[in-house]
Amino acid sequence: MDNRKYNKRNIGQLLFLIFLIIGTILIIRKQQNTPYQHDSGMIFGTMYNVTYQSDRNLGEGILATMKEVDSSLSMFNQNSTISKINRNEHVEPDRMFIDVFKLAQDVAKQTDGSFDITVAPLVNAWGFGFKKGKMPTQQQIDSLLTITGYQKVKYIKKDGKGTIVKNDPRIMLDCSAIAKGYGSDAVARYLESQGVKNYMVEIGGEVVTKGINSQQHPWRIGISKPVDDTLNVNQDIQTILNVKDMAMATSGNYRNFYYKNGKKYAHTIDPKTGRPVQHSLLSATVLAPNCATADAYATAFMVMGIDKAKHILHNNPEIMAYFIFSDDKGATKVWYSEAMKEKLTN
């Protein structure tokens, strides 16, 4: 009698195992047969490319998601939330704006102000100054520094409604150094809400990946060589990273710079000094759990330079970085986080 029970139990377990194996094979086969879709276009003044595995094209939803980000964070959209706040209109910030503002302020604190979304007036002064052939004076810089600084703006709730409070109405917010990364995150969330398991989202070089590509391999993302290239025609690759279930953002001065009286000026402005940064770091690529975080830290590292950036990385093990810099003799060198080793393909 006991043997019969034992045999029945074994048969039941065997049948369950067979069904499990068959089910797994069918799932894998269906996954392999599901096509990869690709959508691309222009958003936020840059190109976007989205590749994902799905039986249906989700292009309309992807574009709608990016337009929602644009309507919240774009300074070029006069009806966006950030534009209204910059004009000091009474507007309750939307969910996306609040998310980005809080993250931006947190990164600003973590980096001692190297990342600062109030720095726009200084960036404009240097940009327009070079275009007009005249750099801003120290007096002009000092004046602009009085209306910049992340500590001079905050988000509060009053009577159950959220609002942005500025110390000075002339303060302007600019989320361009984090918005593309946040946009990539938003599209990734949309794809996951549609059941997509494998995808790569890229907006202006800011990338989010999940799962595998159409060749059943981890997504491979290249880091450009930091060659002076204002026309953005150089496509040489410094290295390629295996990026799976992570986000990646790169910031660099090699495509945005000016020459004045034989001296090279980077487009990255130090929020503390109000002047272009002067150090050896050419490019900062950051891997993080989400792209908005990667985007913000990549910008902050370009401001603070490699030595201070290493200190930040030590205190934030959830992010890793790949730095390209010039040594004392002008030769190009690289440094990367210990955890980055397993991501390198060459």
Image: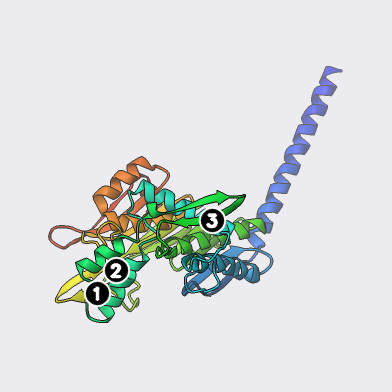
Element at label 3: strand
**Residues under numbered marks 1 and 2 in contact, where contact means CB atoms less than 8 Å apart:** yes
Q: Tag count in the figure? A: 3
- For badge 2, the amino acid type reads His
- For badge 1, the amino acid type reads Tyr
Residue 264 rendering spot, x and y as whole percentages = 20, 71
Closer to the eye: label 3 or 2: 3
Q: What label sits on residue 173 in the rendered view?
A: none
- Rendered position, 154 above or below 229: above
Is 285 left, or right, of 281 in this rendering?
Answer: right
Q: Which residue is mark 2?
A: 267
Earlier in the chain: of badge 1 and badge 2, it is 1
Residue that extends furthest to the left in the rendered view of this protein: 329
Q: Nearer the viewer, residue 239 or 316?
A: 316
- Whole-angstrom CA distance, mark 1 to mark 2, is 7 Å
Q: Which residue is drawn at the image coordinates 35% and 62% (left, top)? A: 119
Is 168 left, or right, of 190 in this rendering?
Answer: left
Earlier in the chain: of badge 3 and badge 1, it is 3
Q: What label sits on residue 163 in the rendered view?
A: 3
Q: What label sits on residue 258 in the rendered view?
A: 1
Q: Which residue is drawn at the image coordinates 48% and 74% (left, top)? A: 76
